[in-house]
Amino acid sequence: MKAGDLVEIYNDNGSTQAMAYPTPTAKPKQAFMLFAYPSGVQGNVVSPGVNEFIIPNYKQTWGAIRKLADAPGGTRHLTFKSQEYISG
């Protein structure tokens, strides 16, 4: 999987689509999604045990990732440079 590729995150509860944005500090098999943003769609794959009326527990939701397509041409203008600040 490369930066900008279109992927699907899925489990028995549902699925959602995303754009891959690799980061050097993520461990293998880890994925992160927008949280508490109007455009965040991770709610499609959380279990029924997550209650939107209390602090949601998204961290214990498991899912698989599969590549749907190579990065589309519309991503050519994007940079996938790390956004993390490393102090020296």
Image: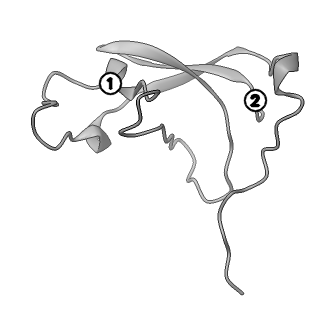
Q: Position of residue 2 (x, y in %)?
A: 78, 33
* Dot label at residue 64: none
Q: In the picture, residue 62 is in which quadrant?
A: top left
- Label 1's element? helix
Where the C terminus falls, by quadrant?
bottom right
Q: In this view, does 1 lie to the left or right of 9?
A: right
Where the N terminus falls, by quadrant?
top right
Q: Which amino acid does label 2 sit on?
A: Gly
- Above or below, 68 relative to 45: above
Q: Badge 2 local density, few (<14 within 10 Å), some, or many (20+)?
A: many
Q: Which residue is drawn at 17% across and 31% down?
A: 50
Q: Which amino acid does label 1 sit on?
A: Gly
* Dot label at residue 4: 2
Q: Where is residue 59 in the image (x, y as percent from the top left)?
A: 30, 44
State how far apart marks 2 and 1 are (Cα): 22 Å
* Dot label at residue 43: 1
Q: In the picture, residue 10 is in which quadrant?
A: top left
- Label 2's element? loop
